[in-house]
Image (cartoon, rainbow, N blue to C red):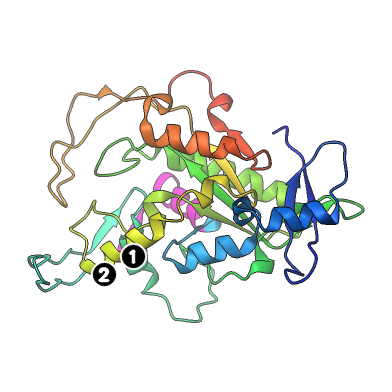
Amino acid sequence: VSKMSLTVPPASPLEGAQVMLSRVHSEVSTEESKAFLKSDGAKYVKAKTIIDSIVDGTRLLNAHFVIWLSEQIFLGDKTGIRIPAAPEVPAEGQNPVIPMIPEEILHRMPCRQELERYEAGFPKDYQGDLPLPFIGKLEEGDIAYWDHTKKPECYIGNTKIVTVSHGWYTKKHIDPDNITLRLLAATLTSYLEVLGKTSIQYIAVFLDFTAFKQKTIREKTEAEKVQMKKALKSLNVWYAHNMCEVWLFTKMASHICKYVNDEYLDYTRTETATEVLGYHGRGWTYFENMISSLSSTTPMLDLGKLIDGDL
């Protein structure tokens, strides 16, 4: 990452906010700071924008949970994760009855609705050893950023935000063979070790499959559709905000066995692997890559460059 940003404490009435402006060799004047804070681009440097996006319905994964889930799938007894049943949803307006979903043990990343059912099984003030799937409530001061005005320079805040840009392997599930999960968990493990001597205690991961309600296990309810529409309005924030570090999973497996059909809860897969459309040939990943590149202060990491050969 070859980017530099300077932290500029703005003048009143936005006192207390931290503003990141791109600079290489010059200081940022108070007048420049004031002018920038009045522009449309200012939302991509304010912690409040991230908090507002969460309030609008986006959920962030707990990195410690991602690592734990990977271990449950790949190590020891490979027990996976038990997802409780979902009750039947009565007919609503033009929507028919949504059938119940039975309890299931998954050996893949659960979608958001599945993780929320799993999360509901914990006591409200749970303090045990198992990591909860989602990051809890965040305040503006929690979100970490690198402060160039401190001597020595250092991180401020205790929660680092990482945005994942990746290609879905199938329409039904993003990663049925856990290729992305394995790489994500390994990278998060290393990153937490690196950040161990800083103020950062948590990494909050934006992954679309778990951030938003999905239509991969059953039809969405009317309430879920409304929530999804609202949350999508802030989608660009996670890729363009300079307090979000974007990880690009540009290397994908060349072939994969896909699901036979799109029927809910039918996970029968083909015996023959078919070719996978690469990261750079997809519309969504192109959008994510481009919007992340628009900001001169959004850190980006291409994890595909760490891998030789096929996944």
**Residue 279 located left or right of residue 303:** left
Image quarter (top left, top right, bottom left or bottom right) of the N terminus: top right
Image location of residue 168, percent across then percent down? 34, 38
Q: Nearer the viewer, residue 36 or 251?
A: 36
Magenta stretch contains residue 262 = no
Q: Which range of residues does the magenta coloring cover?
A: 65-83
Q: Secondary structure at mark 1?
A: helix
Which label sits on residue 223? Answer: 2
**Residue 87 located left or right of residue 214:** left
Q: Nearer the viewer, residue 109 or 174?
A: 174
Q: Nearer the viewer, residue 26 or 249?
A: 26
Query: Does 257 sit above or below residue 85?
Result: above
Image location of residue 224, percent across then percent down? 28, 65
Image quarter (top left, top right, bottom left or bottom right) of the C terminus: top left
Label 1 sits on what residue type?
Gln
How far is mark 2 from mark 1, CA to CA? 6 Å
Crowd rating for badge 2 (residues with CA inside 10 Å; few <14, some 14–19, many 20+): few
CB under 8 Å between discs 2 and 1: yes
Q: Secondary structure at mark 2?
A: helix
Label 2 sits on what residue type?
Ala
Instruction: Give the residue pinned by disc 1.
Output: 227
Crowd rating for badge 1 (residues with CA inside 10 Å; few <14, some 14–19, many 20+): some
Image location of residue 301, percent across then percent down? 60, 35
Image location of residue 134, percent across then percent down? 47, 64
Residue at x 63% of width, y 61% of height: 47
